Amino acid sequence: MGSNVLALDGVSAYYGDSLVLQEVSFSLGEGRLLGLLGRNGAGKSTCMNVAAGLLSPRNGHLEFFGETVTEIKPEELAHLGVSLVPQERRIFKSLTVYENLAVAARQPPWTHRDPWEFSTVFAAFPRLGERHKQVAGSLSGGEQQMLAIARALMSNPRILLMDEPSEGLAPQIVMEVIDTVSRLKEQGLSIILVEQNPKLVFGIADDIVILNSGRVVLTGTAADLNPKNLDLTEYLGIF
Amino acid sequence: MTLYIILTINSITMGGLLFLLSAGFSLIFGLMRIPNLAHGALFMLGAYFGVTFLRMEVNFWIAVIFSGVALAIIGGVIERLLLRRLAGQELAQVLVTLGLAFIIADVCLLIWTGDPIPLNAPESLRGVERFFGIVFPRYRLAVVVIALILAIGLWFLLERTRLGAMIRASVDDPEMARVTGIRVSRLFTIVFALGAALAGVGGVLSGPILSVYPGLDAEMLPLALIIVILGGAGSLPGAFLGSFVIGFIYNFGQVFFPDLAYVVLFLPMLLMLVLRPQGLFGKDPL
Ligand SMILES: Nc1ncnc2c1ncn2[C@@H]1O[C@H](COP(=O)(O)OP(=O)(O)OP(=O)(O)O)[C@@H](O)[C@H]1O
Ligand SMILES: [Mg+2]
């Protein structure tokens, strides 16, 4: 096993006075895909927001590439190589597809031989290429999700945080998204994939973390926690 | 007939000047949601800087540029040191910018005294130009051309460059823009500095037409407000059209309804607020 690229260590986080994460700890190994599972309101997005610098933990700390970080701005994390595909996509609706990608484009020092740039992104997501002049708000849900992923890739990240990228999409498009995620993993990107549906995650994840009411209730490798061997319904509700 | 021609020329000139005043006001208001009540004062300060540069025998155009740069720096400092701390608190921003307006006005009075100071147009632009038998004062023509060029340049910057797209992304979803790696706070400083620079440039350019005098600030601010309400906050085309509409209403109103000058000016604004609160080209109601 390689080293960790990202770790949460005893992180507690609040929205105002309400405690949403309680001493959450888990880590993402280099080149691994970590599936973060939990039911509605379990705190998955909050974990992603903390890891992207949008929410500062009140206790505990974060580690990126082995360095401890307490207060860091989201734009600084982005420049360290952390990219977020947020829940509900949050593409820049009034910008064109092309502009959505252009504002994120960056080639940091660790960029490998074939970096993500317009040509590679449009090759991977041909629909976006066809619609590059279109205003992003007018895209279909599936296309918006592709754009959110493409935008995250344009910065050539080292860590990709994906928050329920399959939410609200037709089953066929969900499969496309999952395909894309596994291709990214094959290319060596370290990924956290948040999902509510364990079936989607177990097929591709290396590691699994399950959250419930803001606490980590289970961690392990996907092989150990295979749903065939383990009754996950008590953690995840009924699917 | 001649009266109409003169009024029309004056209206168009004033429209150009008003665009320089209101473009920055509109960008700052529309993009950063800051109602910058010091904008009229920045315009006047720019004009007074022009006075000083010209007294130092600086070339007129260089004075315009210096004044723009000086105002950009002052605007940037105001944004960084004061307004940054008040992000999202509109009432506090209103009060702080109003206070700044008073302070700037007082400082101007102290330095440049209370007498109106006329500015000379550059030598090469004195006199007139004739088209189709109509006489156009050259300097006024130049002001309109400069306003047009700046309008196109600004539009290009905002709509056709990566920097412009980053600014628009930051307005769309500031949080997501930061996550994407855009340094939103730096961009907003740039926008504020740019708006202040435009006011400064407008101030110097207005000198040969309006002269520079205490109270210029208080005269300009309401006009900027009316224009932004007419055109829609944050919209350059809106500021452009609004500026010329107000240029005409102001000049023709003063001649034909001298007793109702303010009614004529503010009535369109009131109607717009009632009928179409987002303005002609705006996206969000004020
Ligand atoms: N901005 C906010 N302010 C206050 N409470 C919030 C906020 N966002 C989320 N919460 C609360 O924090 C808890 C965790 O929310 P979070 O969004 O992290 O859950 P989640 O696991 O991502 O759920 P989902 O699957 O619905 O996306 C929930 O109880 C939610 O109501
Ligand atoms: Mg969520």
Image (cartoon, coloured by chain):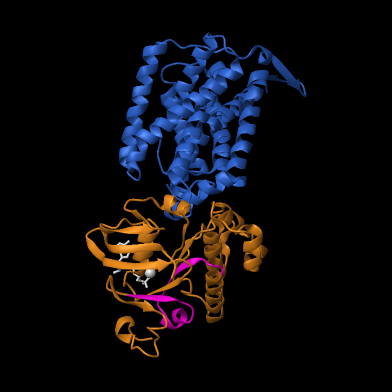
Front residue of this view, candidates B179 and B171: B179
Residue that lies at the very extreme toward the bottom in this rendered image:
A228
Residue A195 highlighted magenta (yes or no) = yes
Is A84 situated above or below B261? Answer: below
Q: Report the front residue among B214 and A57.
A: A57
B3 sits left or right of A161 in the view: right
Q: Which residues are magenta?
A: A187-210
- Looking at this view, is A45 or B197 the one in front? A45
Q: Chain B's colour?
A: blue
- Going by the picture, which residue comes out furthest to the right? B132
Residue at 64% in and 32% down: B149
Q: Quarter holding the C terminus of chain A?
A: bottom left
Q: Residue at x 38, y 50 (%)?
A: A73
- Residue A36 place in picture, x, y as percent: 39, 73
- Above or below, B68 relative to B28: above
Q: Colour of chain A?
A: orange
Q: Name the quadrant of the N terminus of chain A.
A: bottom left
Viewer can see residue A133: no
> Percent x, y for residue B32?
43, 43
Q: Position of residue B25 (x, y in %)?
A: 47, 36
Q: Name the side, left or right, on which B228 lies relative to A46.
A: right
Ligand 1 image position (quadrant): bottom left
- The percent coordinates of residue B163 (x first, y second) are 56, 44
Which residue appears at 31% of the width and 72% of the height? Answer: A42
